[in-house]
Image (spheres, grey):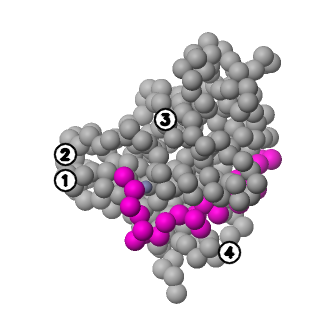
Amino acid sequence: MANKAYAEIGVIGGSGFYSFLDDVTELQVDTPYGPPSDSLFLGEIAGRRVAFLPRHGRGHHLPPHRINYRANLWALRSVGARQVLGPCAVGGLRPEYGPGTLLVPDQLVDRTKSRTGTYFDGLPLPDGKVPNVVHVSLADPYCPAGRSAALKAARGREWEPVDGGTLVVIEGPRFSTRAESSWHQAQGWSVVGMTGHPEAALARELELCYTSLTLVTDLDAGAESGEGVSQEDVLQVFAANVDRLREVLFDTVAALPSEGERDCLCVNALGGLDPGFDLP
Ligand SMILES: [Zn+2]
């Protein structure tokens, strides 16, 4: 029988993704950084053990800048997860990336302001261990194997994805001004979100594979000529696409390499350096 407290894959996303799975185990996990956004919900997809974590907490009470990203990634790793999928809603920065576009980014720009983006902050952990100063490479922030699994899964569901692009992450929770949005577009960036950082960076520091799947729910303020983004539009488009996004996620899970087959850059992100603490 499967170990109900174990999962090899983590998915950071809400109840729309796991609520109908059979035999889901709810697990409360604590971490040296405090509690994650919510319990982990563990189940099985295509014979793989998966842990779901509602990024904003159930009931969606945590704004993007209050999410305990360090606790979330740590909690997933502590139940065994080594590959993490991070679906999120974004705004499109080009007219051709309208609502319903699925984009699998290959680059990231951090424009957040108040978030702790590292485990290597020099502060002692509750067990007294002090992190060493370690600088990981984030040149390629997303797992290549995870990206190709996600692209293949989307194509298999006849949802032609945009292969690559830059996700710019803003602090939120407000949407961009027209000037900010126009500036993001002028840089050639593709989509704008509020949660992609520091998730990807923290995953890399824990030697986790991390893949972002972004669903465009609106055209950002500078890319359209109407009233600007409204929360109502975003929720509506997300709800209209959650079923097929779940199908793509599950097919991605099935297509991810098995633990023994992982041979991407993420696996050895610390390059053998001592982090100064024990990875969970
Ligand atoms: Zn990887």
190 is higher (above) or lower (below) than 82: above
**246 is within the stretch colored magenta:** yes
Q: Name the mark on residue 132.
A: 2
User: What is the residue that sits farthest to the bottom in this orientation?
Assistant: 1
Mark whose residue sits in front, 1 or 4: 1
**149 is within the stretch colored magenta:** no
**Alpha-carbon span between mark 2 and mark 3:** 25 Å
Whether residue 25 appears in this view of the structure is no
The quarter of the rendering in which ligand 1 is drawn is bottom left
Query: Which residue is located at x 68 percent, y 18 percent?
Result: 222
Residue stretch in magenta: 239-265
**Three-letter amino acid code of the residue under disc 3:** Leu
Q: Secondary structure at mark 4?
A: loop
Marks 1 and 4 close (CB-CB < 8 Å): no
Percent coordinates x, y for residue 56 in the rendering: 58, 46
Q: Main secondary structure of the magenta part?
A: helix
Query: Which residue is located at x 61 percent, y 12 percent?
Result: 179
116 is higher (above) or lower (below) than 75: above
**Alpha-carbon span between mark 4 and mark 3:** 35 Å
Q: Which of the two labelled residues, at mark 2 and mark 1, occupies the earlier sequence position? A: 2
Q: Name the mark on residue 130.
A: none
Q: Name the mark on residue 108.
A: 3
**Three-letter amino acid code of the residue under disc 2:** Asn
